[in-house]
Amino acid sequence: MKDWISGLEKDKEELNQKLSDKEDELDKARHDLLADIRARDSEILRLKQLLDEKTKTGNCTAIRSVEQTPEVIWENPTRISPRRKTKQSNIKEKRVTLVQIGAGYSFTLTWLENPVNGHISFLHWAP
């Protein structure tokens, strides 16, 4: 009986250690996600400022249409499986395209975001 109790206590200690490790991993993942979000947001802000600077120094206006403004971001909708009513994909594709004819300035940035695990994958950067 004492062996059984000591075995359970040992299992409890191992499980507590695993739980502690998982909590540490979760905290690190949260920290990394916030750092990635800050980096992405600062890069977007830098690119918007660069566009504003190009617009001010160039003697023409930037082309602005639905697909070419920095404010418009296209997202694909999440499909739901009819059988189980579960989400098939939480991944969102986002794209920003900016063009300025007079200065010859143009770029497109496309990335995928997975809100479940916070992963961001850059698909395409075309200067």
Image: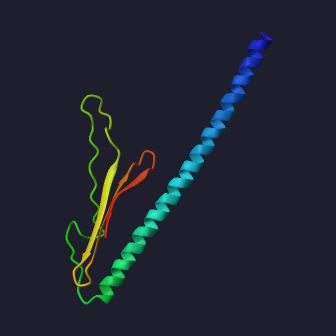
**Residue 90's x, y, as percent?**
35, 45
Residue 115, horizontal then vertical, whole percent: 41, 49
Residue at left 27%, top 38%? 80
Q: Position of residue 123 (x, y in %)?
A: 34, 56
> How many numbered discs, if any?
0
Q: Give me the residue at 32% from left, 42% from top.
A: 89
Of residues 6 and 43, the one nearer the viewer is 43
**Image quadrant occupied by the C terminus:** bottom left
Relative to 34, residue 2 above or below: above
Residue 88's quadrant in the figure? Answer: top left
The image's colour scheme reads: rainbow
Quadrant containing the N terminus in the rendered view: top right
Res 9 quadrant in image:
top right
Residue 31 at x, y = what percent? Answer: 56, 54
> In the drawing, does residue 118 fall left or right of residue 124?
right
Q: Is residue 63 above or below residue 81?
A: below
Residue at 32% x, 89% y is 57
Q: Is residue 81 left or right of residue 39?
A: left
What residue is shown at x 73% (from left), y 18% (from top)? 7
> In this view, which residue lies farthest toward the top?
1
Residue at the outermost right position: 2
